[in-house]
Amino acid sequence: MSQQTPPETAPSGAGRGLFVAFEGGDGAGKSTQARLLGEWLSEQGREVVHTREPGGTTLGRTLRELVLHGEDGSVSPRAEALIFAADRAHHVATLVRPALARGAVVLTDRYLDSSVAYQGAARELGHEEVRDLSLWAVERLLPDLTVLLDVPTREGRARRGDVHDRLEREADDFHDRVRRGFLDLAARDPDRYLVLDATRPADELTAAVRARLGSLDAHPGGTSGVAGAGR
C-alpha cells in the first residue's frame, strides 16, 4: 500500500469557530472522547456542536442506513466512496460551515480522513482519488485539529462486542489496512494531528486533547484558543 498524502489545503480559517475531528478505527473510543471534550468546552462557555459522519444530518442518517445497514448488505467499493462523499458534502454545507461561521466549536466523529483510510487504503481505491473526491465535496475544508485514536485491530473488535455494521464485520486484515492508512496520514501532516494510544485511560486521553487545544491560540479567523485548555 502506498503512503497517504495529506490534503494540501487550509483548515477552517474562513470561519470564526473551531473544527475538531476524531478519527480512528472502529472501537477506538471516538464518541466517548468527543463527548468528554464537548462537556468540558461547554463548561468553558463555548457553544459546542456534536456531529458525526455519516449521519450528522437528516439526509446523512438515510445514507448511513443505506451504506452501513442496507438489507442485502452489499455496496460496491466505488458506490461506498461516493455515498460517503455525498453525505460529507451535505454535512459541511448545511451544518459544519454555518456552525463555524457563528463561532461554535464543531466536534465530529469521523471526517474525510476516514474515507482515505477505509475506501482509499483498505478498499484499495487509491488514496489520492478518494482524498480529492472528499476535498471537492467539502470545498477543501479541513479541521483545525484531527485527533487520531489509535487502537490495535483485535482490541477494537473486542470493544465492539457482538453488534457490527457492514464495515465493522470486515476481516482483521481490512481493519489493519485502515489503521495503517490513518497512521500514514498522521505521519505526513503532524501539525494537524494528535495521535493518541487509545488503550490509555479515557481521562488521560481527554487531558492530552485539552492540552493540544491550548496550542491553537493562533486559530485562523481571529478566534483565540480555548481558555485554560492546558489545565
Image (cartoon, rainbow, N blue to C red):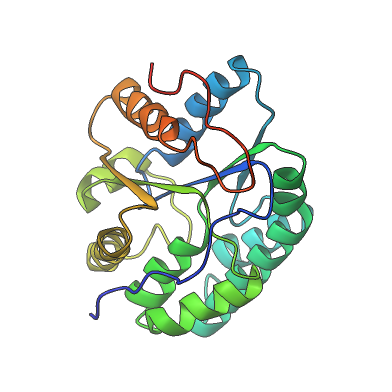
* Res. 75 visible in picture: no
Question: What residue is rendered at 61% in x and 53% in y?
Answer: 13
Residue 175 appears at what percent x and percent y? 29, 62
- Say above or below: 9 vs 196: below
> Which of the two residues, 218 or 112, is positioned nearer the viewer here?
218
Question: What residue is rendered at 77% in x and 49% in y?
Answer: 98
Question: What residue is rendered at 49% in x and 27% in y?
Answer: 37
Could you say which quadrant of the image residue 128 lies in?
bottom left
> Which of the two residues, 145 or 63, is positioned nearer the viewer here?
145
- Say above or below: 4 vs 188: below
Residue 141 appears at what percent x and percent y? 60, 62
- Horizontal side of residue 31 vs 88, given as left or right: left
Q: Quadrant of the C terminus?
A: top left
The total number of labels drawn is 0
> Which of the two residues, 215 or 31, is positioned nearer the viewer here?
215
- Say above or below: 120 vs 191: below
- Say above or below: 206 vs 221: above
- Horizontal side of residue 127 vs 88, given as left or right: left
Question: What residue is rendered at 67% in x and 55% in y?
Answer: 14
* Res. 192 visible in picture: yes
Residue 94 appears at what percent x and percent y? 78, 56
Residue 195 appears at what percent x and percent y? 29, 46
Q: Quadrant of the N terminus?
A: bottom left
